[in-house]
Amino acid sequence: MSYTYAATETYSVADIEVVMRRVTADLVMIASSTRAITEEKARDWGHDIEFLAKHGYLKKVDLTLLSLGVEQKATCFVVNTASGDLTMSRPGGVMWPLVPNPELRIVLSYTQAYDDAAREQISPRLKINWVPSKADLSHPTLTASASRDYVSHGYGMERKDFRL
């Protein structure tokens, strides 16, 4: 299956899989270093993110590490379907800290195509029971830091990092 969004930008399901392997690797590394969730749960998140991306429903993924309710670090992955200007990076980067009472909050943002009918059709195939969130994703107490891009042909994810 291929998707075309502009005359010069095309990508395949295989391209999404290449990018999502890197995103999932980040999720697993974050789970391991923070000990806030299991690596298995991180892989379940990766499964759902990839599944939604393959169906054109994923817009953004925001992952935040909290300690006693206070933001410590965050990463935002933004889908880019015209990724010609992006360059491939390796997963990883700075290790996430081990903090007291760690909590990882993940919030997915969807495209307009992810309507009630799509939710009803897709939700049985997801591993996580995703629920609405009203979390502030602007990370006002954090500062933008290094970023990475994951790309394969016309499909990419821009990773933006935030830290104290």
Image: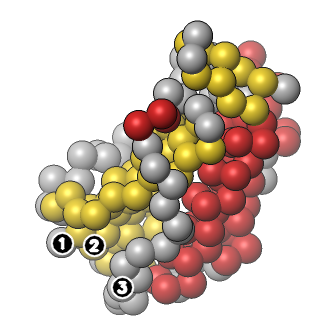
**Res 27 seen here:** yes
Identify the residue shown where x is 34% and y is 54%.
Answer: 160
What's the residue type where badge 1 is placed?
A: Leu
* Residue with the mark numbered 3: 97
Q: Secondary structure at mark 1?
A: loop
Report how far apart the C-alphas of labels 2 and 1 lie in the structure: 6 Å
Residue 128 locus on image (x, y percent): 71, 52
Given contact means CB atoms under 8 Å apart, are the residues at marks 3 and 2 in contact? yes
* Residue with the mark numbered 1: 164
The answer to which of 120 and 20 lies nearer the viewer is 20
The dot on residue 153 is none
Circle 3 packing at 10 Å, graded few (<14), some (14-19), many (20+), is some
Q: Is residue 89 left or right of residue 160?
A: right
Q: Is residue 148 left or right of residue 33?
A: left
Q: Earlier in the sequence, mark 1 or mark 3?
A: 3
What's the residue type where badge 3 is placed?
A: Pro
Circle 1 packing at 10 Å, graded few (<14), some (14-19), many (20+), is few
Identify the residue shown where x is 40% and y is 82%.
Answer: 95
The answer to which of 30 and 124 lies nearer the viewer is 30
Given contact means CB atoms under 8 Å apart, are the residues at marks 2 and 1 in contact? yes
Residue 115 locus on image (x, y percent): 64, 17
Q: Secondary structure at mark 2?
A: strand
Residue 98 locus on image (x, y percent): 39, 89
